[in-house]
Image (spheres, rainbow, N blue to C red):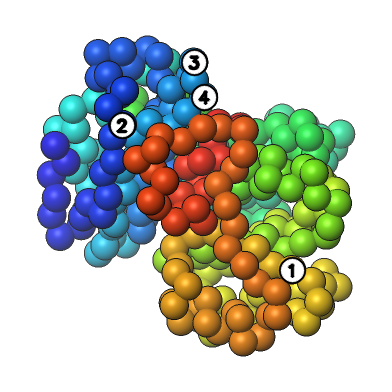
Amino acid sequence: MVKENHHYRQLLKITDESFDSQQLSAYHLCISYSLNRVRLAVLDVARHKFIALEDYELSNIFTTAQGAQVFQEAFSAHPYLFSSDWQQIKISVTNHNFTLIPDTLFEPEAAADYLRLNCDFDPERESIFTYHHQRIEAINIFSVDTYLQQVWQEKLPAKKITYLHLTSALISGLLQHSERNPERKLYAYIEKKSLCLLVIAAGKLEFCNLFQGNTPEDFLYFFIFVMQEQNLNPDMDRVTVWGDLTHDSALFTLLRTYIRNVQFGSRPAGVAYSYKLEDLFEHHYLDLYSLPFC
């Protein structure tokens, strides 16, 4: 069981009857990690089906070192999280340290230089990772803090952990979502203090960036700014949103005031979901549901 404290609080735990903790080698463990939220999902590989999901809210965490320490303490008693039996473990991290470049221009030895053009990269507390998006012929270069890596190295020293950036998960999931839609659209994924906006047309990514905000007005500004920069019309073009908001939330109400055609997104097709997940809003957990497409 997870040790709840003033830093971590469990919001949701759903487990399908078919889940067998003695058969972890048949499953992929998918984790979405940030300083505000930790989410876990279990994918039955043979059936390509999500059969478990857990959601935890974080608070009063101000540094990456503190976040990793609290994560280790909170989940040290989890019955199977740190098992070496998983067929695969994927961890998606949310931070602003990423950049996308065409794969034809990518030189592995220059990865740190590419990243420094877009953010402040600290090699003493961060490691660089890359992910190749073959469908858009681009490389996502991003960093993962070493404190989080050390937790997994200590718990599972012989296990290979696949690290991804939130944007790679979203790009993969949304390309899957939009592959049959030639319409040029703005897609949004919203968390507590961050907003990822993507423009996709005919299966091609045209824009992707992460923004940080504290109020609904902050997020609205980024929506309108990006739509203007990308020549999208708030009165004409459709916007689809996923993430931590509801139909009656202040942000969604504000969006509907200034954007005529705004709607919630659905779960990605191409993967199945336990019936126990059917009662959840379909626009929640895109960060987890997209990981099988990476």
> Which residue carries the number 3 mark?
46
Q: CA distance from mark 2 to mark 4?
A: 14 Å
Q: CA distance from mark 1 to mark 2?
A: 35 Å
- Give the crowd class for mark 4: few <14, some 14-19, many >=20 residues within 10 Å: some
Q: Which callout, 3 or 1, points at the residue further toward the start of the chain?
A: 3
> Which residue carries the number 1 mark?
238
- Give the crowd class for mark 2: few <14, some 14-19, many >=20 residues within 10 Å: some
Image location (x, y in percent) of residue 10: 22, 51
**Residue 122 relative to residue 111: left or right:** left
Q: Which callout, 3 or 2, points at the residue further toward the start of the chain?
A: 2
Image location (x, y in percent) of residue 203: 81, 45
At x 38%, y 51%, the residue is 279
Give the amino acid at mark 1.
Arg
Q: CA distance from mark 3 to mark 4?
A: 6 Å
> Which residue carries the number 2 mark?
16
Q: Are marks 3 and 4 in contact (CB under 8 Å)?
A: yes
Image location (x, y in percent) of residue 223: 66, 74
Residue 280 seen by the camera? yes
**Residue 151 relative to residue 228: left or right:** left
Q: Are marks 3 and 2 in contact (CB under 8 Å)?
A: no
Give the amino acid at mark 3.
Ala
In what element is the residue under mark 2? loop
Q: CA distance from mark 3 to mark 1?
A: 36 Å
Q: CA distance from mark 1 to mark 4?
A: 30 Å
Q: Which callout, 2 or 4, points at the residue further toward the start of the chain?
A: 2
> Which residue carries the number 4 mark?
48
At x 14%, y 33%, the residue is 77
In what element is the residue under mark 1? strand
